[in-house]
Image (cartoon, helix red, strand yellow):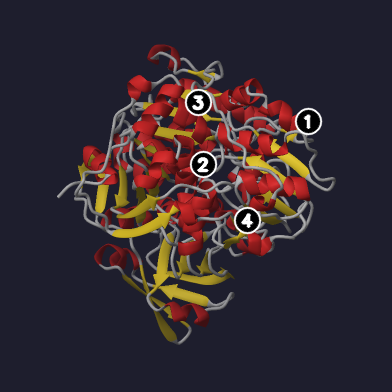
Amino acid sequence: MGQNVAQKVISKHLVSGEMEYGTEVGVRIDQTLTQDATGTMVMLELEAMGLDRIETELSVQYVDHNLLQTDEKNPEDHLFLQSAAQRYGLWFSKPGNGVSHPVHQARFGRPGTTMLGSDSHTCAAGAIGMLAIGVGGLEVAMAMAGDPLYVAMPEIWGIELTGDLPDWVSAKDVILEMLRRHGVKGGVGRIIEYHGPGLKNLSAMDRHVIANMGAELGATTSIFPADDEVRRFMSSVGREDEFEEILADDDATYDATDTIDLSSLEPLIAKPSSPGNVVPVREAAGEDVYQIVVGSSANPGLRDFAIVAEILRGQQTHNQISADVNPTSREIFEDMAKGGWLFDLISAGARIHQSGCMGCIGMGQAPATGRNSLRTVPRNFPGRSGTDEDSVWLCSPETAAAAALTGKITDPRDLDMDYPKLQLPDKSSVNTAMLLPPLPVEEARQVELVKGSNIESLPEFDPLPDSLDLRVLLKVGDNISTDEILPAGARVLPYRSNIPKISEFLFIQVDDSYATRAREDEGGHIIVGGENYGQGSSREHAVIAPRYLGLRVVVAKSFARIHWQNLANFGVLALEFDDPADYDKIQSGDTLKIENIRSQLPETHEVTAKHGDSTIKLRHRLSPRQAEMVVKGGRVAVAAEKQGEPGKVANSMS
């Protein structure tokens, strides 16, 4: 039987296990990606491990999230990251060079390779036939140390694309259609592979849009074939010699299937406050809009900015609209200027911001309270924009541009104009001046890490006791995101390397008394959650900070993949209800008692908890390797048992 694209890449990198759904496999990792909101912790983990130099083929540290410099914290952390990149052998992308995902695709991405990134949207690189997976920072640190990624083998979900996109409909509407059909949990436990005749008119950057937001479906990753369009893209960025064709075999099969007729799609929009809350734009038409934000890794290509510029050309944005534009890379910024599109945007009244994540991560461009903001970003979780009571909608650049002109949510097909026919350049600008290459080994060993006053060492965590008798400090509902556990934004992310300080912001969107109560509850505590607990960002701070405040167990109906792994990595026991109805029996303030943990975890996936006079059946999904890791207090604690010999620490952490 033939193989699909995902199977071909995995089999080429398989170091342990069999490609059977649900069984643990070890996959060799070629590249890693870190960004500044998560990379500071990764570099501290490398330091704690005593790593001399990374063992991946290529690793890149980007600075794209924390670009606002309102005090010394962000620039000092940038200096730390640059020194760490020099010390350990990484490339370093300077502030202002651009968002990690489109920059990496253009400058370093290579079909058929594997990549881990400490950013959930690392999956965007699947656009060019890479197996790229977002994980927690510690997983990336271990990959840099030469370890494989251990993961339960996902299903391969084949999505056949047919037809051609109509005018006023673009790639963002394709992924919004996936979310409309399947919701934010539809991709859990799956790799999404796109195939079919509809691919022929989807550019590599269109595919980037679709692959990027596979994270919003909860997918392990998304992947496209490396076909003639990927060859064209690689040529346009000056790297055709690195192209390798990777196509599914004619007799390839998939574990699950779906079909999208692109010609049947219409403009779609995700209502506040979930990427899965998707409706046709025409159903939301007429709602007042006060801001549009164009850019982010979810709409990063030159086309996405040029189409907005063409729609706005010769006109002015509506009086009540703030039109904010984040060019996503220095190179795309240059091409916007060369093509005249930057002039068109400025003339129409747009506000041009620096190349970076910016509004997507709540680092500037926060909207007014309760005023509708239409954004081409990937997420609209509550408060992610930087405004606690926000109203963020997710849409295509075309729909955002239509609102910019009318001041209302408007189906772009209703604009009194023909759909612009773009003429994009065959060759993209190439400007690598802000990409600093790794230092030679001997020179790197002389580099001292530059640590500002805001950088604290990684906290040490004790082993999991054999018996727990703990209070439920917090009970939350379904689809709680990591943004709700620990927000991003300008007031929080500057403390990304200071766990004691960042822990003060835990759950402020849900229960702002949590941090205070956790400090008072010295014996540790439990959190109870609903379905899909921990969806969204890969930031491991959303585990490290509550663990620092005493979190020992999370009991939920189900977990999002990355957050579940982060819990295990830092010694927090993640348990699921055997009967989801038992969720309703537990209230905040109740006590759960779990005994004989050390004997239960490795031997069985069933765990029993005492709740008053009753018993609640729970289960875990830890492999024996992971169970041992949790009992010992996490992956770092396991590493601490092996000291002295280079490489031994890293190997023990797998």
Which callout, 1 or 3, points to the residue nearer the camera? 1
Kindly check if marks 1 and 2 are in contact, taking CB atoms under 8 A apart as contact: no
Mark 1 = which residue?
347
Q: Amino acid at mark 4?
A: Leu
CA distance for labels 3 and 4: 28 Å
Mark 2 = which residue?
458
- Regarding mark 1 in the picture, which secondary structure is present there? helix
Image spot of residue 206 (x, y percent): 48, 40
Which callout, 4 or 1, points to the residue nearer the camera? 1
Q: Amino acid at mark 3?
A: Ala
CA distance for labels 3 and 2: 16 Å
Among the two numbered marks 3 and 2 on one chain, the one whose residue lies closer to the N terminus: 3
Relative vertical location of residue 333 with respect to residue 371 in this rendering, above or below: above
Q: Could you tell me if residue 514 is visible in this image?
A: no
- Residue reaching furthest to the bottom: 613
Q: Amino acid at mark 1?
A: Ser
Which callout, 4 or 2, points to the residue nearer the camera? 4
Mark 3 = which residue?
84
The total of numbered circles placed on residues is 4
